[in-house]
């Protein structure tokens, strides 16, 4: 089969995506194209003006919510109909929904051009299906996979505080306010790593905020922490998948919100302690517990590491995604170009 993969990245990137490599190993021809990250309007413009005929492919695979919208929009304007597949259909910003019925109906109609949707949490099957009235039989869960890079952890960009430390990393849908209060209540230190566009509340001397740290420095702080902490604001958006897998691979126990969007990756008590959302007291108690019971924390960390290595490796999840793509191609109507 002839397949086009479109993903966000940096101009000039000549690497091959994992799904492209896996499909090529299975005998398919894959064009792997990178478009520059940017606003959703910049993404749409790049895809609509991409100098390639979509009709010449058996399937188009995109790898983000806004890419999927742009591909679906372009395919709606064509008579030839390759399969339309998206991997990683989660919200990292505003959805295509304005609260005006005719406009929202148009957006939903565009998104219903999707033939296969792969999400990285089971909760998103319902959330994304409801958001755009998609056929849930077309939405499938495959966990997000990751392998530790070979590079060592980096030297920290700020001084390392003394005493027990907890680390919280992320940008989207993170409850930094509860983390900050919990760290103070637990009598510990905390590090928040995020980007400059995230909303971070005022923090006291017990919490340091680091912006735009590279992965290697994130690894340093996770390894230095007593536990990797993932607290979310709501269950309407996926959040914490990458940080959870990274923390497990670095053999750290976790403290995480009791939210379905995280439960596909972290289970309590196997991999850490689940806490009530927006509950600083509950979170502080969990922090004190992992400090007081280092053996229990180590056992959680080891189980998490084994889970990530076996079930959440890049190779394991890429095989699952390629299986779904091939199944969709096999069901493709014979008359479809």
Image (cartoon, rainbow, N blue to C red):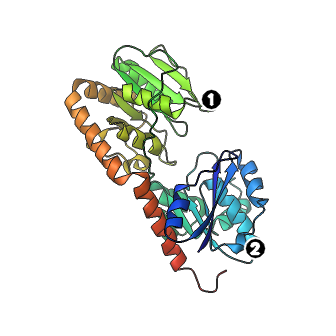
At 59% from the left edge and 56% from the top edge, which residue is drawn? 63
Name the residue that disc number 1 marks. 196
Q: Is residue 209 visible?
A: yes
Specify few, some or many for label 1: CA neighbours under 10 Å numbering under 14, 14-19, or 20 or more.
few
Vertical order, 139 against 311 (above or below): below
Left or right: 223, with 110 as reference point: left
Which of the 4 image quadrants contains residue 131? bottom right
Secondary element under disc 1, as helix, strand or loop, is: loop
Q: Quadrant of residue 297?
A: top left
Q: Nearer the viewer, residue 286 or 272?
A: 272
Residue at image point 78% right, 62% down: 51
Residue occupied by mark 2: 78
15 in relation to 301, above or below: below
Image quarter of the C terminus:
bottom right
Across the whole image, how many numbered discs are drawn on residues? 2
- The image's mark for residue 235 is none
Q: Secondary structure at mark 2?
A: loop
Which image quarter holds the N terminus?
A: bottom right
Q: Nearer the viewer, residue 138 or 5?
A: 5
Foreground of the two, 311 or 184: 311
> What separation in Å lies between label 1 and label 2 (alpha carbons)?
40 Å
Disc 1 vs disc 2: Cβ atoms closer than 8 Å?
no
Q: Is residue 105 visible?
A: no
Q: Measured from the top left, where is residue 320 in percent x and y?
A: 43, 63
Q: Earlier in the sequence, mark 1 or mark 2?
A: 2
| Residue 280 % position (x, y) | 39, 28
Question: Residue 11 placed where, x, y %?
Answer: 70, 46
Residue 314 in the figure: left or right of residue 52? left
């Amino acid at each position: 089969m002839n397949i086009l993969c479109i993903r966000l990245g940096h101009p000039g990137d000549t690497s091959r995506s994992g799904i492209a490599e896996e499909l090529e190993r299975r005998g398919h021809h894959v064009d792997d194209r990178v478009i520059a990250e940017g606003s959703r309007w910049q993404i749409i413009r790049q895809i609509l003006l991409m100098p390639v005929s979509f009709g010449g492919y058996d399937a188009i695979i995109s790898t983000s919510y806004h890419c999927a919208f742009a591909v679906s929009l372009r395919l709606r304007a064509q008579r030839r109909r390759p399969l339309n597949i998206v991997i990683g259909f989660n919200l990292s910003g505003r959805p295509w929904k304005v609260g005006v019925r005719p406009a929202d109906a148009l957006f939903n109609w565009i998104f219903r051009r999707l033939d296969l949707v792969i999400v990285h949490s089971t909760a998103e099957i319902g959330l994304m299906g409801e958001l755009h009235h998609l056929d849930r039989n077309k939405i499938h869960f495959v966990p997000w996979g990751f392998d530790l890079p070979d590079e060592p952890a980096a030297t920290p960009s700020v001084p390392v505080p003394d005493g027990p430390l907890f680390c919280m990393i992320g940008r989207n849908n993170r409850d930094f306010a509860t983390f900050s209060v919990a760290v103070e209540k637990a009598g510990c230190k905390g590090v928040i790593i995020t980007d400059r566009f995230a909303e971070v509340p005022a923090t006291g001397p017990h919490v340091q905020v680091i912006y735009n740290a590279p992965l290697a420095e994130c690894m340093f702080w996770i390894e230095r922490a007593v536990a990797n902490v993932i607290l979310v604001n709501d269950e309407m958006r996926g959040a914490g998948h990458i940080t959870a897998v990274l923390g497990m691979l670095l053999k750290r126990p976790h403290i995480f919100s009791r939210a379905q969007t995280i439960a596909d990756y972290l289970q309590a008590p196997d991999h850490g302690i689940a806490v009530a959302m927006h509950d600083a007291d509950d979170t502080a108690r969990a922090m004190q517990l992992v400090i007081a019971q280092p053996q229990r924390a180590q056992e959680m960390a080891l189980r998490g590491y084994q889970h990530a290595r076996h079930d959440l490796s890049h190779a394991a999840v890429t095989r699952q995604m390629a299986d779904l793509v091939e199944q969709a191609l096999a069901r493709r109507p014979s008359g479809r170009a």
